[in-house]
Amino acid sequence: MKFLSSSITKLFGIVLVFLVLAFFPGCQKTSLDAGNTIIPESESSAMIRAEINNYIVITKSETLPAGFEKKLSAYGEIVSSTPEIGEVVVKPKVSDFEMKIAKLFEVQAVVPDIMAKWIEPIKFIEEVNPPSIGSNETFFRYQWGMDAINAPEAWNAGFTGEGARVFILDSGIDADNPDLAPNLNITLSTSFVPDENFYVRDGSFFNHGTHVAGIIAAADNSWGVIGVAPNAEIVAVKVLNEISGSGAFSWINAGIIYAANNGADVINMSLGATFNRNGSYLDENDVLQKMPAVYIQNLILAQQRAVNYAFNKGVVIVTSAGNGGSDFDGDGSIFKLPAELQNVIAVSATAPDCWVLSPDPLFDLLASYSDYGHSLVEIAAPGGDYDCDAGYPYDMVLSNGAGRPNSYPFYFAAGTSMASPHVAGVAALIIAKNAGKLSPQEITKQLFKTADKIDGSGISAYFGNGRVNAFRAVTE
């Protein structure tokens, strides 16, 4: 992902810096049955170079059996438990931990709780809609994405997301940001990253979760920018380290369950990791690691359980399709989490063509970096791009940055991480219009049915069902 930031007092001050951030993938989703195979510790440990401190124990039943935690405590320290999906994280205190736990009749699988890179390295720089409630926002004129999805028309029709609750699973949030504080539920916001608060550290810098939150629900407050659903409630759930963008599987799974149990209407996950079905992945230090293929299958199984739990509780789950510029129809050896799971909406990124230079700009080009494929993409949304030399950086997406405690910068950013929250925001508009009475299946159908077909009349490899349209979603 590439992004540019600008302070509110100096929008055109340009400085080049490098950082780490996120994007990722899911249309014809793959169902996986990991079976009940356990790799013996003596065989598997040699294949894993990364240090493993904790293990995820997955039970055969999708809820935790009574007394099972107590039984496990004889073999190790219980780090955390997610009984809703039959998952316990354990720090071993006996030798041959995997072999011993695998023999327990309740156990489906034992897998390392690996730390993976969920946000890719990015480059960043600090740095026309119809009249609507957004017109008095300081930087609304740069928010071409709102024009592209007809958000101002939706606002003018009276739809602003009030009553919908969106959980943002990401790298934290700037809880004091004037654009976000009016809509942020501090009581529910939480962190599953050990020793980190849900709110970010002090200082002015790009923060992935803060930028995503602004796209979804920056407030209508005559300051800064405005979100797709400016009156929706947002909840920050930190599941990734705010500096490295890395995180454990168990953190993300726990975040999904937490959102589902606390009234989420929508979960946005602008995050993802790519795994080879043969057993390789990038660890938190961007080092390629190798592990038994069955571990990958069981990690997918555990996260699918978490997604299914949330979906069955009535939650719409939106994520990003990925920034590798790859055709996923041609490579069945890789799997992207969470985007390729069942019951997840994967979003590709659209971008304009030097819109500030054109009297009649195009907004619906496939972004140069966006992953694509019929097997992956289900819908598209503005993600921005950075390949217009003359118009750079205005083809990117402008949103909030972190500025604790009192200096609040804004950033242009490009990635499918920016596309996903546009869809999450429109989902919030639909939910609010219907007073929360629609099922996730009905909301998804409405998103797809009212999306603009920009690549023929069928399902597009680049844009799925089309580019999301906020106005049509709440009026048709």
Image: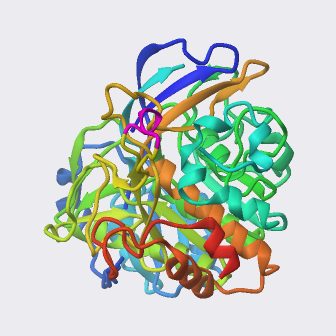
- Image quadrant holding the C terminus, namely bottom right
Q: Does any portion of residue 53 appear in the rendered image?
A: yes
Q: Is residue 453 magenta?
A: no
Q: Does any portion of residue 267 appear in the rendered image?
A: no
Residue 86 is drawn in which quadrant? Answer: bottom right
Residue 79 is drawn in which quadrant? Answer: bottom right
The magenta stretch is 354-359
Q: Position of residue 207 (x, y in %)?
A: 58, 33
Q: Position of residue 330 (x, y in %)?
A: 13, 69
Q: Position of residue 96 (x, y in %)?
A: 33, 61
Q: In the image, is residue 200 above or below residue 472?
A: above
Horizontally, residue 211 falls left or right of residue 418, namely right
- Residue at (74% x, 23% y) in the render: 404
- Image quadrant holding the N terminus, namely top left
Q: Position of residue 62 (x, y in %)?
A: 54, 85
Q: In the image, is residue 297 above or below residue 77?
A: below
Task: Pick the residue in front: 97 or 60.
Answer: 60
Task: Pick the residue in front: 136 or 223.
Answer: 136
